[in-house]
Image (spheres, rainbow, N blue to C red):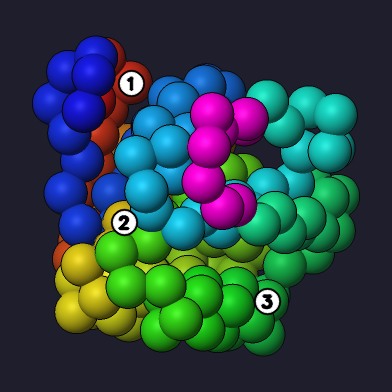
Amino acid sequence: MAGGRPVSPGVSIIIEPAPDRIMRLFSELVTGGCKGLYMTRRLPGEVNVRPERGSAKYVWLPSREAQCGAEDAFALGSTIEKFLEESVGGVVAVDGVDCLDSASGGKPFAEMFGAVSRKALNQRAYVLVQIPGGALSEERREKLARAAGLPILAEDATC
């Protein structure tokens, strides 16, 4: 992949202030032939993901003000798993999930992404999760990643 180290199949948590890197990685993977699903809380005009070619779907998540509980983590996980079942080698990008973690206490979120990670690995698919740098404390991010068994790519990491 151009621009540095490629991401690996499975789930990767990307810590960055805005979803610039996640949008770039998503676009590159879809342009390269992966089917894509982009999930975001941003308004449609704010999503600057325009793969040069390929197939991508977009899903809008509840706004920052909305409370997101365990049932929302389950619904998000179900949507991702269904897409992965239909799209071997596909890519899912999710930005703005800090709301889901903080509102649900973290456990349903971690369990959901743990299950999604196993599905993604089985399907040779990519799931990119963006969490804003200041949204969760470092301790909370590490606890979330450990509970879900996920790698974290810090803000200064190269992808």
Q: Which residue is mark 1?
A: 155
> Residue 31 vs residue 141: left or right?
right
Q: Position of residue 46 (x, y in %)?
A: 78, 27
* Identity of the residue drawn at 56% across and 53% down: 55
Q: Position of residue 135 (x, y in %)?
A: 54, 36
Mark 3 is surrounded, within 10 Å at the Cα level, by few (under 14), some (14 to 19) or many (20 or more) other residues, namely: some
Q: Position of residue 115 (x, y in %)?
A: 32, 81
Question: Quick check: is 53 in the magenta stretch?
Answer: yes
Amino acid bearing label 1: Glu
Q: Which residue is mark 2?
A: 126
Q: In terms of secondary structure, where does tag 2 sit?
A: strand
Task: Looking at the picture, tell me which residue is in the foreground, 53 or 151.
Answer: 53
* Identity of the residue drawn at 84% across and 38% down: 44
Mark 1 is surrounded, within 10 Å at the Cα level, by few (under 14), some (14 to 19) or many (20 or more) other residues, namely: some
Amino acid bearing label 2: Tyr
> Residue 7 vs residue 77: left or right?
left
Comparing labels 2 and 1, the label whose residue is closer to the camera? 2
Q: Which residue is mark 3?
A: 72
Above or below, comparing residue 25 to residue 115 in the picture: above
Question: Quick check: is 108 in the magenta stretch?
Answer: no
Taken as a whole, is the magenta stretch helix, strand or loop?
A: loop
Instruction: Look at the image and give the residue range highlighted in magenta.
Output: 49-56
